Amino acid sequence: MGLSGVQVLNAAIEGMPLEYNAQRFLDLKDRVNFLGVVVHPGFHNLIYGNNSPKFWAQLFDVFRDVPVFAICNLAADLHPDCETRGYGEIIEERDVSDYLFWPGINFSPESIRNFAGHLEYFNNLIAEYCQFRGCLRIDMREILMPKSYEEVTTRFHDLIHPRASEYQAMGAVARQVLGPAVAGALVRANARKRVLTAPAGIPAAEVQSGSIYPLW
């Protein structure tokens, strides 16, 4: 993301529910100077998990006491035409050998409408939470979601995972949202002239720039 003055720690693990990351954050927050947290809720709870507003509000609240807190919207390889045309034409007429069509989903118009409905519901939930709590929201939909039916499969390698070719653009969007907030938080932190000492088990040499980053 190219954010100056901070070290980015990627704590995401494929398939891990966010509850585990929240608990690890609570375990570390008294030992690590977290300037900020960026949460991407993931799709696993969207369809078959707990997706109630109360559940997610309580989970997001775990991270709120850091100076910078942001939540990412969910983006998927969907265009409105997919809800009426499905993916049948794409499968039949294009070379999609490098695109994963998940087993168990027939990618029919009905299935896609169902998925799109869940997606809209959850993104609305995120938007309402961010507005109510005053936290930042990072929206990747504009750069990732296809602008036409013909663009479906070009930015993603399955329904939800962007291709590596999109990573730079995603980083730029995150940097645009986070950059000013991180810079302001760093100014406030430096003004306080907070003195940190290394916690037990972490060599003092690892304490740099006012932050401690043990392995997640």
Image (spheres, rainbow, N blue to C red):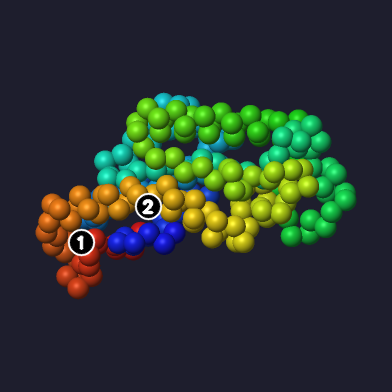
Task: Please state which amino acid type lies under the numbered disc 2.
Answer: Gly
Number of marks present in the image shown: 2
At 55% from the left and 56% from the top, the residue drawn is 169
| Residue 129 vertical position relative to residue 14 in the rendered view, above or below | above
At 13% from the left and 52% from the top, the residue drawn is 192
Residue 115 picture location, percent across and down: 66, 34
Contact, CB < 8 Å: mark 1 with mark 2? no
Answer yes or no: is residue 98 visible.
Answer: yes
Which of 44/1 is in front? 1
- Left or right: where 102 falls relative to 132: right
Task: Please state which amino acid type lies under the numbered disc 1.
Answer: Gly
Q: CA distance from mark 1 to mark 2?
A: 18 Å
Q: Which residue is mark 1?
A: 210
- Left or right: where 33 falls relative to 156: left
As drawn, the label of residue 179 is 2
Callout 2 environment at 10 Å: few (<14), some (14 to 19), or many (20+)? some
Mark 1 or mark 2: which comes first in sequence? Answer: 2
- Left or right: where 97 falls relative to 23: right
At 72% from the left and 35% from the top, the residue drawn is 80
Residue 73 picture location, percent across and down: 51, 40
Q: Secondary structure at mark 2?
A: helix
Residue 184 picture location, percent across and down: 27, 49
Callout 1 environment at 10 Å: few (<14), some (14 to 19), or many (20+)? some
At 32% from the left and 51% from the top, the residue drawn is 182
Residue 118 picture location, percent across and down: 60, 31
Q: Secondary structure at mark 1?
A: loop
Q: Quadrant of the N terminus?
A: bottom left
Q: Quadrant of residue 23?
A: top left
Answer yes or no: is residue 27 visible.
Answer: no
In front: label 1 or label 2 = 2
Q: Quadrant of the C terminus?
A: bottom left
